């Protein structure tokens, strides 16, 4: 059952698209206090809405998408306030996304006995105090402006997620090539440098499908331009790369450079398509191009205009993009920059005491991403002037929507790769996300894993982290271990920052190990693609905590470093420096495949319970559930070379195992399960039966 409660006068985020199963709707007027199911309600002095719920000692909080800390979010204070912050450390409360869905699970010994899901449909800042202030209380606080609360009750954890996903609409579907390995770095300066990257991968036998172009491919960081000196005859270069089975994926930033003669700027200015200040002047900020205006993507006409500019690169053969800096990031706001300059230049450094120094330092460091500066920006939403503060979390979502709606107009029959840094619920229909500017820290491998189920709960199935870490300097063992997790994530991209150690796989000594790990990814593609598409088309999850699959297991909710991947597999990656293995909990008997390559592995059956499992630096642990199968290809240098007509089957047969394999052409936009399913059955004797859309030649591995 889904119940809807409206507080105040909220902005319609358009996150919810299907209300046919919403049973009740109640309007809660400002100042009215009372009770909802599970929650007490009160209004704060500044118009904020505060909902509070008591928790039992064993209650667990799942969800909230992209956030720090564990799978269980209990014990910390989270803020949905899309933020440009590259330091994803434990004290942070908000990152790039605003993913306002969680499940409180109290159905276990010592719990509250309640299980329900909550979606706070809000465009502004929302705070989730999950037992931080009071360890027994969960509090949701929405800033002034109103919001809609959807309360989802009845059913298992997975059923509540499914109900929520049906409420907010289907997940974005990428093309199949986007499941291949991608190489990226801020700092690829020329076409020749990209050619060298591709050559080194191909000569080293390192599979590769895409190379990402960061801001350096542009002409002075201007959106929808290409620097002709660095990348001469760009359309021919795109064709050349496609002949090598490489897709180029350029970045698009939110800020449009202020420059006469630049058509994006001149068109936007002429037609009033940029965000404004309260007095009607265009809002001016600073990011990579210098002084910029921001497209008012919350305005339907401006959104269409900005989206149509993607045609410039689509017409040159590009089939994928990543949107960045769209929280929006704000290095400075022009008026405040002038204020700060006056204050700093007037400081008397000769007589400055330590408190004066701290004030001086705070002024300088506080110029970027200042909340007061966002409050100076205004949008035109259907003829209404709306302060950016009230809709801050929608900006990245609507920038991605601008692109996706344009792709529907410009390339209606093809899937175009699109993923974004900033997002909120609703954006999952238009693109995937990467989890932003992480660091080359061992702790961020675990953080990567722990974000995945929360993102899937919110509909973001196409997701992944910067493998190896974006900031800081990686190491060979860190990159190997991170890739051993990354081979399971739909978006598998190695990305690093300017002035960090180059971390392309071919730069390290253990070339055979890197080659084998990447080839294993391409071996897993039939299973990963099939499980992704079934999850997307059935409103399910690709990555699940163990407790979602084993709800009666009392220990499963405590496991924070293992995940179920699809219906058949469990993963337990190593994320500690110099570790030669790890502890693993098995809710039931499982078969362990310890892969060193597609052709070299050890296999053993482990009973349910706790185990220490060896895992050398070049080994990947894959656990198969009883009476389950997982198809494995023989690999390939790129996704299109993976032959789905010949499959190996990871298996653990006790009585009989059946697997339904989804397979399609990989680019058609409008897809369905019917007609693309193949049923593979294996009985206790090892006999294999194949029925359905395709007839792959299968053998047991």
Image: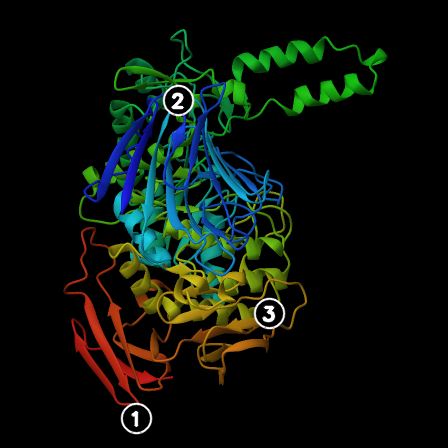
Q: In which quadrant of the rendered view does residue 640 lie?
A: bottom left
Choose the circle earlier in sequence order: 2 or 1. 2
Left or right for 173, reference 463:
left
Separation of residues labelled 2 and 3 (CA atoms): 56 Å
Quarter placement of the C terminus? bottom left
Q: Could you say where residue 564 lies in the image, as x and y percent from the top left?
A: 43, 65
Left or right for 624, reference 669:
right
Against 14, residue 370 (above or below) is above
Q: In front of the other: label 2 or label 1?
A: 2
Against 597, residue 269 (above or below) is above
Which secondary structure lies at badge 1? loop
Q: Which residue is mark 2?
A: 145
Separation of residues labelled 2 and 1 (CA atoms): 64 Å
Q: In front of the other: label 1 or label 3?
A: 1
10 Å neighbourhood of mark 2: few (<14), some, or many (≥20)? many
Q: Which mark is residue 685?
A: 1
Which colouring convention does the figure follow?
rainbow
Residue at x 51%, y 45% (from the top left corner): 67
Q: Find the residue positioned furthest to the bottom.
A: 685
Q: Which residue is mark 3?
A: 510
Between residues 373 and 564, which one lies in front from this camera angle? Answer: 564
Residue at x 60%, y 71% (from the top left corner): 583
Between residues 500 and 394, which one lies in front from this camera angle? Answer: 394
Against 447, residue 300 (above or below) is above
Separation of residues labelled 1 and 3 (CA atoms): 40 Å
Q: Which mark is residue 451?
A: none
Choose the circle earlier in sequence order: 2 or 3. 2
Q: In front of the other: label 2 or label 3?
A: 2
Query: Is there a contact, CB below 8 Å, between mark 2 and mark 3?
Result: no
The reply to whether residue 171 is in sight is no
Between residues 363 and 95, which one lies in front from this camera angle? Answer: 95
Against 288, residue 411 (above or below) is below
């Amino acid at each position: 059952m889904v119940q809807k409660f409206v507080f105040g006068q909220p902005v319609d985020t358009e996150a919810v698209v299907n209300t046919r199963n919403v049973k009740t709707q109640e309007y809660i007027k400002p100042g009215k206090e009372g009770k909802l199911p599970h929650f007490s309600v009160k209004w704060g002095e500044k118009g904020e809405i505060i909902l509070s719920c008591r928790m039992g000692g064993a209650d667990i909080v799942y969800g909230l998408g992209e956030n720090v800390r564990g799978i269980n979010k209990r014990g910390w204070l989270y803020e949905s306030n899309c933020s440009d912050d590259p330091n994803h450390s434990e004290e942070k409360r908000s990152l790039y996304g605003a993913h306002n869905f969680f499940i409180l699970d109290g159905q276990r010994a010592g719990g509250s006995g309640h299980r329900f899901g909550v979606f706070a449909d809000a465009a502004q800042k929302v705070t989730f105090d999950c037992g931080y202030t009071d360890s027994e209380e969960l509090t949701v606080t929405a800033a002034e402006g109103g919001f809609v609360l959807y309360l989802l009750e009845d059913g298992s954890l997975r059923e509540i997620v499914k109900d929520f996903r049906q409420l907010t609409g289907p997940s974005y579907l990428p093309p199949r090539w986007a499941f291949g390995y991608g190489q990226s770095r801020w700092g690829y300066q020329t076409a020749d440098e990209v050619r060298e990257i591709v050559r080194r991968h191909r000569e080293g036998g390192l599979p590769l499908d895409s190379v990402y172009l960061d801001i350096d491919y542009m002409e002075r960081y201007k959106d929808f331009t290409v620097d002709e000196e660095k990348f001469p005859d760009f359309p021919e270069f795109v064709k050349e790369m496609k002949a090598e089975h490489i897709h180029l994926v350029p970045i698009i930033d939110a800020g449009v450079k202020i420059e006469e003669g630049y058509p994006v700027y001149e068109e936007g200015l002429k037609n009033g398509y940029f965000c404004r200040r309260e007095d009607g002047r265009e809002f001016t900020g600073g990011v990579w191009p210098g002084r910029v205006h921001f497209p008012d993507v919350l305005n339907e006409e401006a959104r269409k205009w900005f989206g149509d500019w993607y045609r410039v690169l689509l017409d040159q053969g590009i089939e994928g993009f990543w949107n960045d800096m769209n929280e929006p990031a704000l290095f400075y706001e022009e008026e405040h920059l002038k204020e700060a300059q006056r204050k700093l230049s007037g400081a008397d450094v000769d007589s400055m005491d330590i408190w004066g120094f701290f004030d001086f330092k705070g002024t300088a460091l506080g110029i970027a991403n200042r909340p007061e500066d966002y409050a100076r920006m205004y949008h035109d939403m259907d003829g209404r002037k709306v302060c950016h503060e009230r809709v801050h979390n929608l900006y990245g979502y609507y920038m991605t929507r601008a692109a996706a709606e344009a792709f529907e107009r410009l390339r209606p029959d093809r899937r175009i790769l699109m993923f974004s840094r900033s997002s909120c619920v609703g954006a999952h229909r238009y693109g995937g996300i990467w989890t932003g500017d992480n660091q080359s820290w061992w702790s961020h491998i675990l953080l990567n894993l722990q974000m995945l189920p929360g993102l899937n709960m919110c509909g973001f199935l196409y997701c992944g982290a910067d493998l190896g870490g974006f900031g800081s300097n990686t190491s060979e063992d860190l990159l190997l271990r991170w890739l051993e997790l990354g081979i399971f994530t739909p978006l598998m991209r190695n990305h690093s920052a300017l002035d960090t150690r180059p971390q392309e796989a071919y730069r390290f000594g253990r070339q055979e190990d890197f080659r084998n790990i990447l080839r294993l990814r391409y071996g897993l593609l039939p299973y990963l693609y099939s499980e992704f598409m079934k999850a997307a088309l059935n409103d399910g999850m690709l990555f699940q905590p163990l407790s979602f699959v084993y709800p009666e297991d009392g220990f499963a909710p405590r496991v924070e470093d293992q995940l179920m991947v699809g219906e058949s597999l469990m993963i337990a990656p190593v994320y500690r420096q110099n570790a030669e293995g790890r502890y693993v909990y098995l809710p039931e008997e499982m078969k362990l495949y310890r892969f060193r390559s597609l052709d070299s592995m050890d296999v053993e059956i482990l009973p349910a319970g706790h185990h220490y499992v060896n895992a050398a630096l070049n080994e990947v642990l894959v656990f198969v559930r009883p009476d389950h199968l997982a198809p494995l290809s023989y690999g390939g240098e790129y996704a299109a070379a993976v032959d789905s007509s010949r499959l190996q089957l990871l298996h653990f047969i006790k009585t009989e195992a059946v697997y339904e394999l989804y397979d399609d052409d990989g680019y058609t936009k409008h897809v369905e399960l019917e007609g693309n399913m193949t049923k593979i059955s294996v009985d206790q004797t090892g006999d294999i039966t194949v029925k359905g859309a395709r007839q792959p030649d299968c053998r047991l591995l």
